[in-house]
Amino acid sequence: MDIHEYQAKALLSDFGVNIPQGGLAYSPEQAAYRAREIGGDKWVVKAQIHSGARGKAGGVVFCDKEQAVWDAADELLGKRLVTHQTGPKGKGVYRLYVEEATHIRNEIYLGFVLDRSSDRILVVASAEGGMEIEEISANRPGSIVRMSVEPAVGMQAFQAREIAFSLGLPGNLINQMVKTIMGCYRAFRELDATMVEINPLVVTESDDIIALDAKMTFDDNALFRRPNISELRDKSQEDPRETRAADRGLSYVGLEGNIGCMINGAGLAMATMDMISHAGGEPANFLDIGGGASPERVAKAFNLVLADENVQAILVNIFAGINRCDWVAQGVVQAIEKIDLKIPLVVRLSGTNVEEGRRILEQCRQKVITADTLAEAAEAVVGAWKKAQAGQRG
Ligand code: GDP
Ligand code: MN
């Protein structure tokens, strides 16, 4: 789960990371009020969306008058901001964060990620902050410092000091930097994060180290024990198709094509995707019913696939081990019997109780195309989809 910049800053601040003074605003009036509350004569108005690279997209506005804060807020609120990370649809701006402007001396990159290949938290830092880490690694690879943390002992102050020194920070800033690094690390561990990124972390003209931006991602599987974190979820920033599925305990991946896919297991999803592409189609989504799915759960999953407006044909591909083909068939039938299914449906069942599953499908009043192998199923669904499209055009 991702959270907003202002939320990440508040969390990190509890762990001793310095942040600029700022306040949240939902309207131009509130934004101007925040500026007055903060004081001074320079502010930054920042669109709160779940994406980086807002600066380049016009989502970070510098203001030297209260009226300019009002205007920037008026311009940004309700807009869909398209960054190179959001995809062409962009993300809706419904919250703004107004901050005092900071006088920057230099910008540092500081990131913490879970490195799955070494099973360790990896600290990544660079004295060339401000640009994205991908750009830094392309343009200034030599500036990147990496350090992995031994899980049994955790991050040690000497390691943080080593990072601070290798960034070339002067002696008077080392302690502040160590405090920042240790604070981020503790936040990462204690809040079950999978990513913490401060870019830029800046050295100000008055020799303070301040997080000007902050990004945190959390482990979805740990949210049950972090109620304070799960409260920070903002559904307006998520793909509504994925949200609908997640709320029902199902896992959904939205894609760009037109074939809706209901499968069980990530491996089968990959294989199904390959076979559909091979047959000349493209998946619209994958809905994973998981293991031991009841007919009700299958019906719910099926309806979610159907609710995706990009879906023009459906492939159900189940390789049942823990699952039962008869339950899957019952669920599919439950879902389609009440409706007038206007798009082709191909079902391929294999494994536990497959005969019973096929029998249930045969008795269904709706037209269900069945297939025995994955290859046949992929051919059938792409073929039926093409035919249906041609039929609509002609
Ligand atoms: P991002 O584009 O989504 O990563 O948003 P950031 O919060 O990182 O802002 C983009 C850039 O704006 C930063 O890299 C800074 O260079 C600049 N910036 C943000 N806040 C301030 C500020 O208070 N003062 C100055 N001078 N620059 C800022
Ligand atoms: Mn940034």
Image: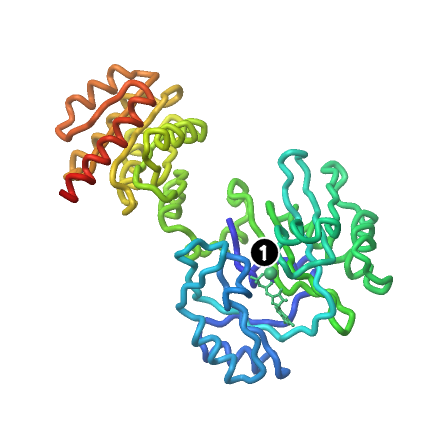
User: In the displayed structure, does residue 18 sit left or right of residue 35?
Assistant: right
- Depth check, front residue: 229 or 4: 4
- Depth check, front residue: 283 or 202: 283
Q: Quadrant of the C terminus?
A: top left
- Depth check, front residue: 58 or 291: 58
Q: Residue at x 45, y 27 (%)?
A: 267
Quadrant in the rendering for residue 297: top left
Position of 327 relative to 194 (above/below): above
User: In the displayed structure, does residue 231 sit left or right of residue 127?
Assistant: left
Q: Which residue is mark 1?
A: 215
* Horizontal and vertical percent position of residue 224: 51, 44
Q: Residue at x 58, y 53 (%)?
A: 216
User: In the displayed structure, does residue 157 sit left or right of residue 87?
Assistant: right
Q: Label 1: state its secondary structure.
A: strand
* Horizontal and vertical percent position of residue 230: 50, 51
Q: Residue at x 81, y 63 (%)?
A: 173
Q: Residue at x 40, y 43 (%)?
A: 246
Residue extending farthest to the right is 171
* Horizontal and vertical percent position of residue 268: 41, 27
Q: How many marks?
A: 1
* Horizontal and vertical percent position of residue 272: 38, 29
Amino acid type, residue under disc 1 in the picture: Lys
Position of 330 relative to 94 (above/below): above
Quadrant in the rendering for residue 204: bottom right
Tell me the quadrant of ligand 2. Answer: bottom right
